[in-house]
Image: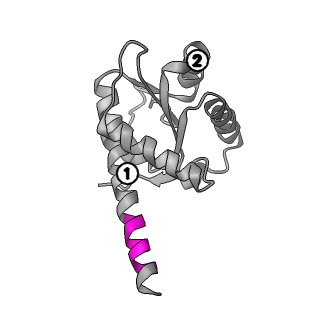
Amino acid sequence: MTLEELVASDNAAQKMQAVTAAVEQLLVAAQRQDRLTVGVYEAAKLMNVDPDSVVLCLLAIDEEEEDDIALQIHFTLIQSFCCDNDIDIVRVSGMQRLAQLLGEPAETLGTTEARDLHCLLVTNCHTDTWKSHGLVEVASYCEESRGNNQWVPYISLEER
């Protein structure tokens, strides 16, 4: 491996860490400010009613769920809608970390059903121009990825 390749690899790893941290910060801030829609069905309803309010779509799935055909069909339809409406999309793995970030209970004891965390939408009111550092960082990463012909970039949320 040459020095240039080593430096490029290190820069890419640092970029991924920065984007992952930005996504985590963005999710926490969006939830705190009631700008987060959680769930495939809820996301579809919102995008049908007010697609212009959506600024980012996160599609979350872990490796063991990759074979879920129904979920993949939902993802394909959501991705298509997002592309048609210029909404940034990011694929995410690390469902446990995602649940932890959103304050989901560690175990559901039959009394509460876990929320569907497979699709998360970050919204922005038409009258408000909310810009968090995390949103700017993630939008920049999405734009850079599209420039490299990676239309749906992927990040992995690591457990802590």
Relative image position of residue 86 (x, y in whole percent): 58, 31
Relative image position of residue 91 (x, y in whole percent): 53, 46
- Magenta residues, dominant SS class: helix
Q: Tell whether label 1 touches label 2 (CB within 8 Å).
A: no
Q: Nearer the viewer, residue 77 or 133?
A: 133
User: Is 101 rendered above or below residue 54?
Assistant: below
At x 40%, y 58%, the residue is 16
Mark 2 lies on residue:
45
* One can see residue 109 in this view: yes
* One can see residue 101 in this view: no
What SS does tag 1 mark?
Answer: helix
Quadrant including the C terminus: bottom left
At x 61%, y 27%, the residue is 85
User: Is 99 rendered above or below residue 157?
Assistant: above
Q: Amino acid at mark 1?
A: Thr
**Is residue 11 on the magenta stretch?**
yes
Mark 1 lies on residue:
20
Labels 2, 1: front one: 1
Q: Which mark is residue 71?
A: none
**Is residue 130 on the magenta stretch?**
no
- First to last magenta residue range: 5-13
Q: Amino acid at mark 2?
A: Lys
User: Is 148 rendered above or below residue 9?
Assistant: above
